[in-house]
Amino acid sequence: MDGIKVVRPSERYKGVVQSGAMQREAGVAPETTGATGIWSGYVTTPPGLKSSVHHHGDCETAIYVVKGRALFRWGDMLQHEAEVGPGDFLFVPPHEIHQEENLSDTETCDLIVSRGCAGILTINVDDPREARPVHDHSNEDVTGHSR
Protein backbone atom coordinates (compact mmCIF):
# COMPACT_ATOMS: atom_id res chain seq x y z
CA MET A 1 0.00 0.00 0.00
CA ASP A 2 1.55 3.31 -1.08
CA GLY A 3 0.50 6.58 0.53
CA ILE A 4 -2.86 8.11 1.31
CA LYS A 5 -5.89 7.06 -0.70
CA VAL A 6 -8.90 9.32 -1.24
CA VAL A 7 -12.25 7.66 -1.93
CA ARG A 8 -14.87 9.99 -3.42
CA PRO A 9 -18.62 9.30 -2.94
CA SER A 10 -18.88 7.98 -6.50
CA GLU A 11 -16.00 5.56 -5.78
CA ARG A 12 -17.53 3.87 -2.72
CA TYR A 13 -17.88 0.10 -3.02
CA LYS A 14 -21.55 -0.86 -3.11
CA GLY A 15 -21.10 -4.65 -3.35
CA VAL A 16 -21.11 -5.17 0.43
CA VAL A 17 -23.69 -7.38 2.16
CA GLN A 18 -26.91 -5.45 2.80
CA SER A 19 -29.32 -5.97 5.70
CA GLY A 20 -32.91 -5.41 4.74
CA ALA A 21 -33.57 -1.75 4.01
CA MET A 22 -30.08 -0.55 4.97
CA GLN A 23 -27.79 0.54 2.16
CA ARG A 24 -24.07 0.18 2.91
CA GLU A 25 -21.34 1.84 0.85
CA ALA A 26 -17.72 1.05 1.76
CA GLY A 27 -15.33 3.98 1.80
CA VAL A 28 -12.27 2.37 3.37
CA ALA A 29 -12.22 -1.34 2.58
CA PRO A 30 -10.10 -3.92 0.77
CA GLU A 31 -12.00 -3.15 -2.47
CA THR A 32 -11.41 0.62 -2.35
CA THR A 33 -8.06 1.10 -0.64
CA GLY A 34 -6.51 -2.31 -0.01
CA ALA A 35 -7.13 -1.88 3.76
CA THR A 36 -6.56 -5.10 5.72
CA GLY A 37 -7.52 -4.23 9.30
CA ILE A 38 -10.31 -1.65 9.11
CA TRP A 39 -13.59 -1.08 7.29
CA SER A 40 -15.44 2.25 7.22
CA GLY A 41 -18.52 3.20 5.28
CA TYR A 42 -21.62 5.31 4.85
CA VAL A 43 -24.89 3.61 5.77
CA THR A 44 -28.40 4.87 5.03
CA THR A 45 -31.74 3.50 6.21
CA PRO A 46 -34.79 4.82 4.31
CA PRO A 47 -37.65 6.49 6.20
CA GLY A 48 -39.69 4.18 8.43
CA LEU A 49 -37.71 1.04 7.61
CA LYS A 50 -35.45 -1.28 9.59
CA SER A 51 -32.50 -3.57 8.99
CA SER A 52 -32.53 -7.33 9.09
CA VAL A 53 -31.35 -8.88 12.35
CA HIS A 54 -27.59 -9.35 11.94
CA HIS A 55 -24.14 -9.33 13.55
CA HIS A 56 -20.63 -8.56 12.36
CA GLY A 57 -18.68 -11.69 13.22
CA ASP A 58 -15.43 -11.04 15.07
CA CYS A 59 -15.50 -7.32 14.25
CA GLU A 60 -15.85 -4.53 16.76
CA THR A 61 -18.10 -1.83 15.29
CA ALA A 62 -18.28 1.91 15.95
CA ILE A 63 -21.30 3.83 14.65
CA TYR A 64 -21.71 7.62 14.44
CA VAL A 65 -25.18 9.05 13.75
CA VAL A 66 -24.91 11.84 11.15
CA LYS A 67 -28.61 12.46 10.50
CA GLY A 68 -31.99 11.17 11.70
CA ARG A 69 -33.15 9.13 14.68
CA ALA A 70 -32.89 5.37 15.05
CA LEU A 71 -33.87 2.69 17.50
CA PHE A 72 -31.20 0.02 18.04
CA ARG A 73 -32.25 -3.34 19.48
CA TRP A 74 -29.81 -5.99 20.71
CA GLY A 75 -29.53 -9.06 22.93
CA ASP A 76 -30.44 -12.74 22.51
CA MET A 77 -34.10 -11.81 22.03
CA LEU A 78 -33.47 -8.19 20.97
CA GLN A 79 -34.75 -7.29 24.42
CA HIS A 80 -32.50 -4.23 24.89
CA GLU A 81 -33.00 -0.98 23.02
CA ALA A 82 -31.66 2.54 22.75
CA GLU A 83 -32.82 5.54 20.73
CA VAL A 84 -30.01 7.52 19.09
CA GLY A 85 -29.73 10.74 17.13
CA PRO A 86 -27.23 13.09 15.46
CA GLY A 87 -23.91 13.25 17.26
CA ASP A 88 -24.36 9.95 19.14
CA PHE A 89 -21.77 7.17 18.94
CA LEU A 90 -22.58 3.49 19.48
CA PHE A 91 -20.27 0.55 20.10
CA VAL A 92 -21.32 -2.92 18.94
CA PRO A 93 -19.20 -5.81 20.31
CA PRO A 94 -18.27 -8.81 18.16
CA HIS A 95 -21.10 -11.31 17.48
CA GLU A 96 -23.74 -9.04 19.10
CA ILE A 97 -26.98 -9.58 17.16
CA HIS A 98 -28.81 -6.32 16.59
CA GLN A 99 -31.27 -4.43 14.44
CA GLU A 100 -31.59 -0.76 13.50
CA GLU A 101 -34.90 0.98 12.80
CA ASN A 102 -35.29 4.45 11.29
CA LEU A 103 -37.82 6.26 13.50
CA SER A 104 -38.72 8.90 10.91
CA ASP A 105 -41.38 8.47 8.24
CA THR A 106 -39.92 11.33 6.18
CA GLU A 107 -36.12 11.38 6.36
CA THR A 108 -33.27 8.91 6.04
CA CYS A 109 -31.12 7.87 8.97
CA ASP A 110 -27.48 8.30 7.92
CA LEU A 111 -24.60 6.67 9.78
CA ILE A 112 -20.83 6.44 9.54
CA VAL A 113 -19.86 2.86 10.44
CA SER A 114 -16.30 1.70 11.16
CA ARG A 115 -15.14 -1.81 12.01
CA GLY A 116 -11.93 -3.22 13.37
CA CYS A 117 -11.64 -5.80 10.60
CA ALA A 118 -11.73 -5.97 6.84
CA GLY A 119 -13.11 -9.50 6.35
CA ILE A 120 -16.67 -10.74 6.98
CA LEU A 121 -18.71 -7.65 7.74
CA THR A 122 -22.37 -8.60 7.99
CA ILE A 123 -24.05 -11.89 8.80
CA ASN A 124 -27.86 -11.76 8.60
CA VAL A 125 -29.61 -14.06 11.09
CA ASP A 126 -33.18 -15.14 11.86
CA ASP A 127 -35.13 -12.78 14.10
CA PRO A 128 -35.14 -14.57 17.48
CA ARG A 129 -38.57 -13.12 18.27
CA GLU A 130 -40.23 -14.98 15.39
CA ALA A 131 -41.33 -18.60 15.81
CA ARG A 132 -39.46 -21.05 13.58
CA PRO A 133 -40.73 -24.50 12.67
CA VAL A 134 -39.23 -27.29 14.75
CA HIS A 135 -37.52 -29.96 12.65
CA ASP A 136 -38.57 -33.52 13.47
CA HIS A 137 -35.43 -35.71 13.52
CA SER A 138 -37.23 -38.96 14.39
CA ASN A 139 -37.13 -40.30 10.82
CA GLU A 140 -33.44 -39.57 10.23
CA ASP A 141 -30.44 -41.83 10.61
CA VAL A 142 -27.17 -40.65 12.18
CA THR A 143 -26.13 -38.95 8.95
CA GLY A 144 -29.26 -36.74 8.93
CA HIS A 145 -30.87 -38.59 5.98
CA SER A 146 -34.46 -39.80 6.01
CA ARG A 147 -34.99 -43.51 6.59
Image: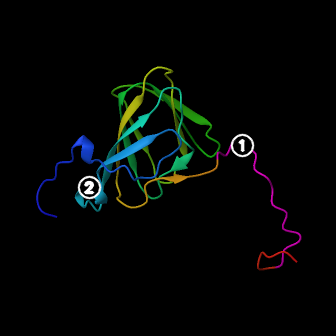
Q: Quadrant of the N terminus?
A: bottom left
Label 1 crowding class (10 Å Cα cut-off): few <14, some 14-19, many 20+? few
Instruction: Identify residue type, mark 1.
Output: Glu
In this picture, residue 24 sits left or right of residue 32: right
Magenta region includes residue 134: yes
By what rule are the colours in the image chosen? rainbow
- The mark total stands at 2
Image vertical order of residue 81 relative to residue 40, above or below: above
Q: Residue at x 59, y 43 (%)?
A: 75
- Coordinates of residue 56 in the picture (x, y in percent): 47, 53
Image vertical order of residue 86 relative to residue 43, above or below: above
**Mark 1 or mark 2: which is in front?**
2
- Coordinates of residue 84 in the picture (x, y in percent): 44, 28
Instruction: Identify residue type, mark 2.
Output: Thr
Taking the view exactly as shown, the residue that stands out farthest to the left is: 3
Find the magenta span and give its range.
127-141
Question: Label 1, label 2: how many angstroms apart (C-alpha)?
Answer: 37 Å
Which residue is label 2 attached to? 32
Q: In the structure shown, which secondary structural element does the residue marked by tag 1 occupy?
A: loop
- Coordinates of residue 49 in the picture (x, y in percent): 53, 31
Q: Quadrant of the C terminus?
A: bottom right
Q: Does residue 97 appear anywhere in the picture? A: no
Q: Residue at x 43, y 23 (%)?
A: 107
First reached walking from the N terminus: tag 1 or tag 2: 2
Taking the view exactly as shown, the residue that stands out farthest to the front is: 10
Residue 3 occupies quadrant? bottom left
Which residue is label 1 attached to? 130
